[in-house]
Image (spheres, rainbow, N blue to C red):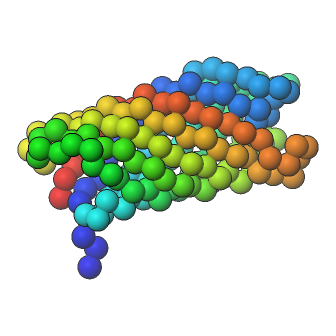
Amino acid sequence: MLLLAGCRTTVGPALSAGSVGVPGTATGIGGGAEIEVRHRSGLAAAVAVDLAGYASAGDADPIVWSEVSARYRLPLFDDGVTHVFVTPGLGAGYAFCCYIDDVVVSGFFEIAVERSVGRFRFGASLRERPAYFIGGGDPFAEMHNTLQLGVSVGVDR
C-alpha cells in the first residue's frame, strides 16, 4: 500500500553557471519547475524540467534538461503549521536541445519553509542542483550548477 504524505509543485527563477554548450564558463538567470510526491517516511520522488540561464554558443539555443530524482526530507522544525526542513537527493536525466544530447547526473539540496493552511501547504525554498552533463563530446563531461529560489504549493493527504 502506498502511504503518500502529499505532493507539491515548485517553480522559480535560478542563477545558472556552467560550461555546458559554451566555451569557458557562462552564467545567467534561468528557471525550473518540478512536481514532487513524498512518502510518510520522508522519502520523495520528483520530476523536474530546468532551463539554463545562458544560451549555447554559436546558435544561442536554450539549454533544457529534465530529470527524475530521489530525495529524503529531514525536518528541522515542525509544529503542525510551520514546517522547516532540508532535503538532500540525487537525480538522473537527459539534456535535450539543438546539438546537446547528454545524460545528466545531479545532486540536490534544499532548505525550505512551508506553512499549512488546511490541507494545503505554501512554501519558499533555496535549492542547489549541481549537475554533470555526460555525453560523447569533448570534453566528455561538463559541469553545471543551479541556485534556485523556489515557490511551492502542495497538498497533504
Q: At x 43% / y 56%, what residue is drawn? A: 71
Q: Which quarter of the figure has residue 113?
A: top left
Image coordinates for residue 60, horizontal then vertical, percent: 76, 24
Farthest residue to the left: give it: 118
Q: At x 32% / y 31%, what residue is drawn? A: 124
Residue 47 showing in the rendered view? no
Q: At x 61% / y 49%, what residue is drawn? A: 106
Q: At x 76% / y 36%, what residue is drawn? A: 20
Q: Which residue occupies the foreground of this view, 125 or 8?
A: 125
Number of numbered discs on residues: 0
Image coordinates for residue 115, horizontal then vertical, percent: 18, 37
Judge from the rendering whether residue 108 lies leftward or rightward of residue 37; answer left or right: right
Quarter placement of the N terminus: bottom left
Judge from the rendering whether residue 107 lies leftward or rightward of residue 126; answer left or right: right
Judge from the rendering whether residue 89 lies leftward or rightward of residue 113; answer left or right: right
Judge from the rendering whether residue 42 lies leftward or rightward of residue 138; answer left or right: left
Q: Which quarter of the figure has residue 144?
A: top right
Q: In the rendered image of this protein, does residue 93 appear above or below residue 65?
A: below
Q: Which quarter of the figure has residue 152?
A: top left
Image coordinates for residue 157, horizontal then vertical, percent: 18, 58
